[in-house]
Amino acid sequence: MKSTFKVAIIIPAYNESNNILRLIKKINYYLKSTIVIVDDSNNDFTKKILSKTKIKNIIYIKRTKKLGRGSAVIEGFKKIFHNKQFKYFVEMDADLSHNPKELKRNLNTLHEKKIDLLIGSRYLKRSLIINWPLKRRIFSILSNYLIKTLFRLDVNDCTNGFRFYSRRSVKSLLKKRYINQDFIMLTEIILFLSKKKYKIVEVKSIFKNRTKGSSTINIKLILISLYYIIKLFIIKKFNAKLFAL
């Protein structure tokens, strides 16, 4: 990848003070980039940690409440997109489940193959999931199977948030209206870019379950996600104009 291409990494964070600084240091070890932290925490622990660090390549956004993972990523895109030097954008979780070691390889693939959305997939032959609870694994597999079947997508992992975007795909995403601001937006983005015939590719990835902090996934969020999957299907099937917005 040409060194003239600047990269912005968007990290939505919710009570990730135990992980955030370690993640930033790992990213900086493997890749020169600008890191945008969008913090929805219900405390100031992450803010205090970042205010004390001497690391310079961080843009910090504190929101007043938890507004959803998807909306946090869009907020990060909006913050940085006006700078036309940024050619590629990355979305990744704050809990160290996504390996910064894969960043440069995936960005090289994105650039060389002129991809619009590259997904670090947990469900390719050479991918690996480490220490994930059985319930989470079952829910993830069933959700992705349902999404892939309903929408006839050639994507195995529609719900993983380790993603690499071209500038033109982000430009389109910033113009779109979304039916949900949380995890289901991951699926909605794939459907939207697929409809626009953008190039979407998956690559192998090693996904490691968090060791510090707690997941925001719960039964309520699972049921809400299933509801929005069905809603997306109905909109796509019966109201293509609304879906395209």
Image (spheres, helix red, strand yellow):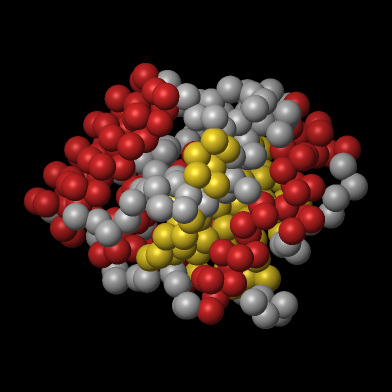
Q: Please state, as top left, top right, bottom left or bottom right, where the N terminus lies in the image.
A: bottom right
Residue 207 at x, y percent in the picture: 54, 42
Q: Is residue 203 above or below residue 208?
A: below
Q: Is residue 226 visible?
A: yes
Q: Is residue 64 visible?
A: no
User: 165 or 177: nearer the eye?
Assistant: 165
User: 143 or 131: nearer the eye?
Assistant: 131
Q: Is residue 201 above or below residue 48?
A: below
Residue 229 at x, y percent in the picture: 25, 39
User: Residue visible at 37% across and 19% down?
Assistant: 219
Q: Please state, as top left, top right, bottom left or bottom right, where the C terminus lies in the image.
A: bottom left
User: Residue visible at 59% across and 72% down?
Assistant: 108
User: Residue visible at 72% across and 53% down?
Assistant: 27
Residue 138 at x, y percent in the picture: 35, 29
Left or right placement of residue 121 versus residue 105 in this view: left
User: Residue visible at 34% across and 30% down?
Assistant: 139
Q: Residue furthest left?
A: 238
Left or right placement of residue 117 versus residue 162 in this view: left
Q: How many callouts does the rendering have?
A: 0
Q: Is residue 224 above or below residue 56?
A: above
User: 190 or 167: nearer the eye?
Assistant: 190
Residue 115 at x, y percent in the picture: 45, 72
Left or right placement of residue 114 versus residue 22 in this view: left
Left or right placement of residue 111 versus residue 151 in this view: right
Q: Quadrant of residue 40?
A: top right
